[in-house]
Image (tube, rainbow, N blue to C red):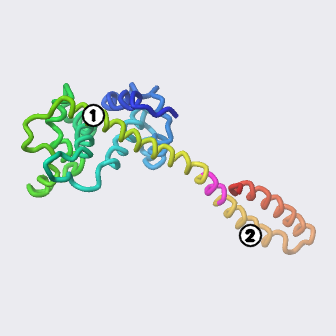
Amino acid sequence: MELTVDLLKIALENLRNPQALDSHPWAESALARDYARRHPESQSLRAGARLAAALNEAFNEWRPARPPRRGKRLDTRWGEFGLLAAYYFAPFAFGSPAPRSLREAWERIDAAILQVVFDANLPDESGRAAYQLISGETFAANSTISDWHRKGLEHFLAFLTGRENHIASQAPRQKIAARELGCIGAWRWFWFFCWRWGHSSARKLAACWAWRARFRRICRRSRPSD
C-alpha cells in the first residue's frame, strides 16, 4: 500500500466527511481492517468512516509519553502533535470548530491538547498547566507553524507506516494460529470418535488410524515453513 504525505493530508482533510474516504487507497489498509477486527461494532460503518476512526485511534497512540518539556524553546514534538490535533483531530473527535488556517490552529493548540489527552475528564488547574504548550506565547513565525505542520505529518506518517507493516506481518501468524487451534479441536473430536466407535471393531479401528494419517497431513500444512 502506498503511504505518502499527500495521501495522509487527503485523509485528514476529510475526517469530518468520511464518505469521501470510501475510495481512499487506505480504506482497505491493514490498519483499517485491524481496527474493524478489534471493534466489531464498526463493521457496520462505511469504509471511509472506519478509516477515519482508525486514524484517530492511531493519532492518540502517537501522542508523546510525557507532558511538554519546559525551557526557553518550545517542545517541538508537542508542537507538531498539538497543531495536528487542533487542525484535524479535535474538530473530528470533539466537534470543535474547524480552524480556517494553520495560524488559527496554532492559537488553539493548548485547548486541543487538553481535549485529546484528557477527553472530558479535565484535571485541576495544576494538571492542565502541565500540558500548556504555548501559554504566554503571543506570536509564532509563519515558518515555525509551517514546519510544525510539515514535520508533524511526516512523523505521523512514519508512525502509521510502522503500524501498517507490523499489522501486515502479524496477519499470516494469526491465520496459522487459527488453523492450529482448528486442528487441536479436530484431534480431540477424532480421538473421542475413535474411542466411541472403533474400539469394538478391528476394521473400524483401522479406519480410525487411516483418518489419523490424513489429519496429521492437514495439520502439518498449518505450520510455518522454516
Q: Does residue 75 sit above or below 28 in this rendering?
A: below
Q: Which mark is residue 149?
A: 1
Percent of width and height locating residue 161: 45, 41
Question: Which residue is pictured at 25% across the width and 36% down the height?
Answer: 148
Q: How many numbered callouts?
A: 2
- In the figure, is residue 187 to the left or right of 178? right
Percent of width and height locating residue 21: 41, 28
Residue 34 part of the magenta segment: no
- In the figure, is residue 226 to the left or right of 115? right
Question: Which residue is pictured at 58% across the width and 53% down the height?
Answer: 174
Q: Secondary structure at mark 2?
A: helix
Percent of width and height locating residue 10: 37, 27
Among numbered discs 2 and 1, the one appearing first in the sequence: 1
Q: Which residues are magenta?
A: 175-180
Q: Does residue 150 sit above or below 61 in this rendering?
A: above
Q: Secondary structure at mark 1?
A: helix
Percent of width and height locating residue 155: 36, 41
Amino acid type, callout 2 = Phe
Q: Which residue is mark 2?
A: 192
